[in-house]
Image (cartoon, rainbow, N blue to C red):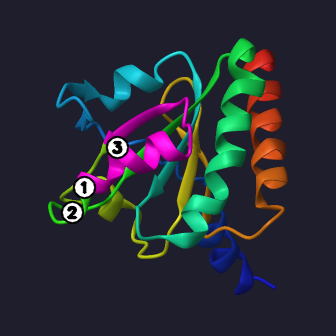
Amino acid sequence: MIRVLPILLIVAMSFGQEKNLPQVNLKDMKNKTHSLSKLVKDQITLINFWATYCVPCRKEMKHLNRINKAYADQNVQVIGISIDDSRTVGRVKSMVKSQKLAYTILLDTEQKLYKNFNTTAMPFSILVDTNGKILWEHTGYLPGDEAQMEVEIKKALALQKKG
């Protein structure tokens, strides 16, 4: 039992480490630069990384649109970040229009932010609190994943009320 305690302590410490959203500036589709930390300040934010060539990303978008609308009055927002590179970024605007996306879309054409999360799968979503602390991460999309997103958003809202 005594030998197990140090291992448990190390495991507990690694889970207890807070991860914060990196401080980056990203451009929108009109080439305007935005500070991501300013965009998420004071709002619970679901950030979704996607690309025009990602089929599951397209399937998830209608749910993200609904979540953005459903929780807007509760200080929750969705931000989509396209990781299309310079060859495919031209398709982003038409994708946003065809999907009727009503949430903020930013571009990470060099994948500088996306690479911070050590993932290669898409879509990739993170939920951050009003201070930019990462509360939850999720990779991929299967029908029903949006329900888990809403559970996590509701947890974040409850935490915010306590704090």
Give the residue type that dot 1 points to: Val
State the image coordinates of residue 105 (x, y, percent, origin top left): 40, 37
- Considering the numbered disc 1 on the image, is that residue within a helix, a strand or a loop? helix
- Residue located 68% across and 47% down the image: 62
Report the side of 152 relative to 131 (left or right): right
According to the picture, the residue beneath numbered tag 2 turns out to be: 85
Where residue 6 sits, quadrant-wise, is: bottom right
Residues at circles 2 and 1 in contact by the CB criterion of under 8 Å: yes
Per the rendering, the mark at residue 89 is 1
Quarter residue 51 falls in: bottom left
At which x and y percent is residue 120? Answer: 41, 76
Magenta residues (range): 90-106
Numbered badge on residue 93: 3
Does the segment drawn in magenta span residue 78?
A: no
Q: CA distance from mark 3 to mark 2?
A: 14 Å
Tell me where residue 25 sits by quadrant.
top left
Label 2 to label 1: alpha-carbon separation: 6 Å
